[in-house]
Amino acid sequence: MPSRRTDAIDLTLSREEAWVAHTALLDACERVVDDGGDASPYRRPIARIERGDELDAAGTALLRDALVDYLGDAPVRDRAPGRALLRRTDDAVDSAPRRA
């Protein structure tokens, strides 16, 4: 039997939430690149969302931060699902086991 990843966060996304999550992460990634930073931390969570896979703790934390930035200027259609997802990502990050 395959082993289950222990760092996965059980965060099921609706289609609407997945769209907002993907958009927020792409937006954050573009800002990092525009500032001369490294976009590689964003590649895995974006790919996992595209595949419908669970995010790990690091990806969930990136998503939470991306949502905080994105929701300030988000289109109206993205605000309600984005806020709901932000609350859930915040709870998931806060309850995730800490690594030593």
Image (tube, helix red, strand yellow):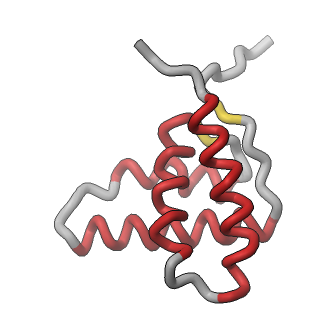
Q: Is residue 69 left or right of residue 87?
A: left
For this rendering, which residue is in front, 49 or 72? 72
For this rendering, which residue is in front, 85 or 4? 85
Q: Is residue 71 left or right of residue 89?
A: left
**Image location of residue 14, percent across then percent down:** 82, 60
Report the residue at 20% width, 70% height from top.
Answer: 35
Relative height, residue 86 to residue 80 (above, below): above
- Which quarter of the image is occupied by the N terminus? top right
Report the residue at 54% width, 64% height from top.
Answer: 67
**Image location of residue 24, percent across then percent down:** 53, 69
**Image location of residue 66, percent across then percent down:** 48, 62
Report the residue at 43% width, 54% height from top.
Answer: 42
**Image location of residue 75, percent across then percent down:** 62, 88
Seen from this angle, which residue lies furthest bottom? 76
Kindly indicate the quadrant of the structure image that contains residue 32: bottom left
Kindly indicate the quadrant of the structure image that contains residue 54: top right
Q: Is residue 100 left or right of residue 75?
A: left
Relative height, residue 29 to residue 61 (above, below): below
Seen from this angle, which residue lies furthest left? 36
- Which quarter of the image is occupied by the C terminus? top left
Q: How many marks?
A: 0
Relative height, residue 41 to residue 27 (above, below): above
Report the residue at 67% width, 68% height from top.
Answer: 82
